[in-house]
Image (cartoon, coloured by chain):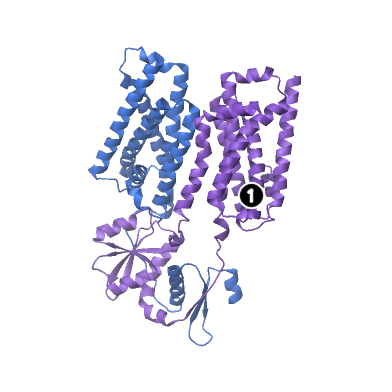
Chain colours: A blue, B purple
Amino acid sequence: MDAILEKDANGVGIDAGDGRPDVVLYAGSEKVDRHRADYALSLLYSGSPYTPETVGGNTPEMKKRKEITCELLFIEIVAVGFLGIASVLFKEKQMGVIRIHAVMPLHRSLFIFSKVFLFLLTDLVFAVLLTVLNVGAAGMGNFLPAVLVQTAILSLAMALTGFGCAMVLRDFKQFSLAYLVIALFATAPVFLTANTPVKMAWARYYPFYQVYMGLKNAFFGTAVTSPVYYVCAACVIIPLFGIVFAAFSREMGREG
Amino acid sequence: MKGLVYQLKSVRKDKFCIMSFLLPVMVAILMNAAGSIDLSSLGELQFGVIAGDVTSETERWLERYGSVMVCQTREELILSVNDPSTNLIGVEMDKKGIKTMLSGDELAVWQQTAQTLPALYRHRKKAAQADVQILERPDILAGYQHIFPAMTLVAAMFMGCTFTAMNIISEKEDGIAFINEILPISAKEYLLQKIFIGFVFGCLSTVVTAAVCFRLSPARAAAMLALILLSAFAASLAGVFVGRLSDGMMEGVVYIKIVMIVFMAVPLLNYLAAEGNKVLTLICCLVPSSAAFEGIMALADGSESGAGKDMVILAVHCAVWFLLYLSLAKRRKKR
């Protein structure tokens, strides 16, 4: 028994040499060890098989599919979408597009709207395609509208942030570092808190965590219904638009 | 010497370079401040009960195996069980025993626990009488605890590549590269001046990061310093190649990201997956950060002589890449 336990340190040995079952096992963590020992002992007693009540509608495979779809969608919008709008604007800045807009008889906000809505639309199309291909079309109607709402919130916030960065930062070189910091700090704590039982107390005040959980809950059929959440989202997006508008106006002034 | 002063002046005004220098130091300080995250509770079981439904004795019994979350209503319990980020097992009283509740999307190990929990509860008195002998085993995760600091150090060393590459690319964009072509300066002098920037800042960033991450004996600190000097030189050389290859800033950023990923992923692959596979280990040795990472891990694990082989590999890298660049520059000049 000792040799077998040494080979498989996760195994549990039962020594019944003196007529009484004694448990031998290698240490893991205290509570898990207790459960392993009691489980091993329970196998000695006969009993009818028991089936727990199932209260959810997902299989383990579907859960994994939904989780990975949610993570990909979040990363795509936070990292790739954010980078996309900024790189487009840096290129346009170089080409003098902003200078041309300064003399066009169009309201400044239309330029911002055109960029932001283009990225919003592509993110929504991407969300639909990713969900159809990864999760499947069956039963999609139950959760897709809620997913699209969360995608729209995240997409608008990130596109406006990317727009603002492109206006405030001097060149793409400076932006690439800001991008690295934002992508790293936005995603790392979110994935740690949302996907593992490690719960960081401050996470509930962290906007990216709230949006990620909104997206994840939408995928799992428990969309956020609290109006506070949507009011907060609007309170982030509207001032962001104001900041972007001011930065864009300043950039136009600078370009002459 | 005057040329080196000019190189330093050009870096001083570059916020990107200054932030690149500070980033690994900040990460090291954050890691130190946060301490090591206790992941021991990750494998523990989580139970959910309804307030007033289970007896205090049952709650204490469940707490022997894991954490217990108390919900006010059955609906709240069902919501918690269905929460996709946890593997919570719902527990309710069932006459004299208990019954369990699952979401259905859990892995087999949690499902098996939920299936057997009522039987464990039934036999809890018998189980309490058995003797349990727990044997000590070495911490299987001990070797992995230095991975994060070592990777931070590799990232800090890599900053030398960013400094050098950005400096050369900026000069190309501003047209200074053309002026450099007609300056009375040899290829070797030019190369040394360019490497100097990345080397000095890469070294500084890595030394500060190492001082924050590790507490080393004088002998190991000296070996670490030698490793840092060689690695920073190799990283700065890589930056020269990136600068030479890139025509514009965007292209340069893409190359830098690729080099960064290779510099960080290859040592990890070598450490985690290539054990015993000599071919893969040899291929990994072609990337200088692999030897640097191995050396750091050896020094962090307490070995003083373990980094010797890695220093030799790094020295060979420095010499080979340096000579390769010079021969390429010579060929270009002839053409």
Q: Position of residue A22 (x, y in %)?
A: 49, 81
The answer to whether residue B296 is left or right of residue A217 is right
| Residue B292 visible | yes
Task: Please tell me in which quadrant of the rendered image residue B127 appears.
Answer: bottom left
Task: Please tell me in which quadrant of the rendered image residue A183 appears.
Answer: top left
In the image, residue B149 above or below residue A132: below
The answer to whether residue A21 is left or right of residue A100 is right
Q: Quadrant of the C terminus of chain B?
A: top right
Q: Position of residue B302 (x, y in %)?
A: 62, 58
Does dot 1 land on a helix, a strand or a loop?
Answer: helix
Residue at the far bottom: name it.
A18
The answer to whether residue B151 is left or right of residue B183 is left
Residue carrying label 1: B224
Q: Position of residue A84 (x, y in %)?
A: 45, 30
Amino acid identity at mark 1? Met
The subunit letter for the residue under badge 1 reads B
Q: Quadrant of the N terminus of chain B?
A: top right
In the image, residue A16 above or below residue B185: below
Q: Position of residue B202 (x, y in %)?
A: 59, 39
